[in-house]
Amino acid sequence: MASNEKLEKYEHYLNNVLREDLRLIVEERERLYEDIAAHSQLRQTITCILEAPGCAEEGLRTQVDLGSNFYVQAHVPDTSRIFINIGLGFHLELTLQEALEFLDKKLAILNTRLADSSKKSAKIKGQIKFFYEAIKELQGQQGVIAYCATMVELVKSVNVNLARVWLVSSLLSIILWLVPLLLGKYVDITFPYIHREDIMQELVGFVGPTESQNVDWCPIVSPLLQDTVHLMSSNVEVLPEEEIVKKSDVQEGGVSKPKSCKSRYQVVVVVPYRNRSTHLHQFLTYMHPFLTRQQLHYRIVVVEQSGEAAFNRAKLFNIGFTETLKLDQVDCFIFHDVDLLPRHDYNIYACTHNPRHMYSAVDIFRYHLPYRGLAGGAVALQRSHILAMDGFSNRFFGWGGEDDDLNARIHRLGLVMVRFDPAVASYVMLTHKSETPAQDRFTTLWENSRKVEKDGLSTLEYKLIEKKEKPLYTLLLVSC
Ligand code: BGN
């Protein structure tokens, strides 16, 4: 299909189908909210009547709205029975107790519908984002094609050497492409993100306000969250191990879950590690209370690389993933650097429907991002997506590139990476010496982009030297 034909189709689908679907869902939700409010109010009135002493003898005095701001006083002599609108124009006479039972059932149904429509709306929003990105990409391609055609025409008309023009313009574009890359840390990039108020419904596992199945789910928004920025600098005080264990009720292996309710989200935080004991101690001191406040059921897994080979961050992620699945059947993994700390509690450490790059703002980049496709530092991925993309590449030894390779894998799956509102997805980085980038990272990236050979979970080879449940984390000591 020609790209402009495709563009038209996408635009039509986005504007006439998806946006219309979203509008209908939003309307339906508004109606449901109104219905729930009306039924809850009636329920409250009936409870009041039932609980008011002597009410049955004296009846009920009330006001009736006649319209146009006219009211009359009314007296209901017998409040023991009530007419309830059961829909389709039918009213049923019920005792107050029967009415309460009816209302409870009705409210449960309405709440389930509300949860369903919230899920549908989250799904449609995801599709809208996807089509929006695809349209932008196609528009970009068309722009380039049109530009090239004009340039060729122009060059032909002035009768110059085409090969030389091509060479000069290629050099120019390389320079233009390199400038932002070289100035990386100082370029402000704007990007779409999930707004703070939409975060909860974007999470996999968000179920809805009143799941009945006798499960005592934790509230959708944990009451322990503090709406404040926790870290102003990367100075993090460490606490002794026993104190961390006690404070966050951490079980062997760095596992913790809420005591009073069942967590909606089970997640594993995989941390690649070597020779950074102070950072690890700071990380554990800070992260255990942070994750506990979010009422998650979580495990922290530290994958330590032994030996002298260059550090292979992505391969350690693959090992962490593979070994953790032997312990727990978890659907959500967060791959996290040891020197990165989230500043805001509303940055929920659960998986979104799309893969998520966890930081939208970080102190070392002046609380901005150097480029849109950045996937470094911390990412949250669903197990199904990790398996579909064959995990991470095992071929990046040394600093850099492995996260760009992850980004390419996500794109190849047809997915887009999302981020949360920078107001909450904000991080500080613990101070450390900057590392020398690996020289062969460009070549590896390029080779991987051609995807000639398999590289990932399917080709993963390593030696597990030790697997131990320590008090604050599960340790995997490995050689790659
Ligand atoms: C990029 C690195 C990433 C790193 C970010 C942020 C490369 C590959 C060359 C295109 N990518 O430059 O790995 O996460 O900087 O520091 O070096």
Image (spheres, rainbow, N blue to C red):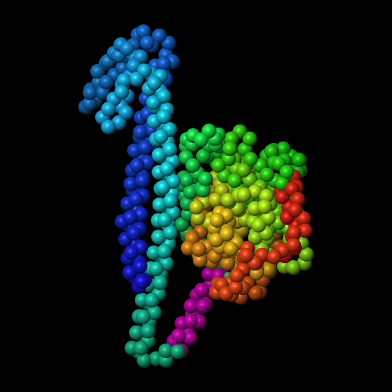
Q: Within the magenta stretch, is there residue 380? A: no
* Quarter of the rendered structure image containing ligand 1: bottom right
Tell me which residue sits at (50%, 44%) in the image: 206
Q: Quadrant of residue 465?
A: bottom right
Q: Would residue 367 be found to the left or right of residue 304 on screen?
A: left
Tell me which residue sits at (41%, 24%) in the image: 101
Q: Within the magenta stretch, is there residue 172? A: yes
- Locate the N terminus and report the quarter of the image it occupies: bottom left
Image vertical order of residue 354 relative to residue 85, above or below: below
The stretch of residues the image draws in magenta is 164-183
Location of residue 29 in the rendering, given as x and y in whole percent from the top left corner: 37, 41
Q: Is residue 101 visible?
A: yes
Tell me which residue sits at (39%, 30%) in the image: 106
Question: Of residues 212 and 480, which is closer to you in this image?
Answer: 212
Q: Quadrant of residue 184?
A: bottom right
Question: Of residues 90 and 396, which is closer to you in this image?
Answer: 90
Examine the residues drawn in magenta and state their main secondary structure: helix
Tell me which residue sits at (55%, 61%) in the image: 388
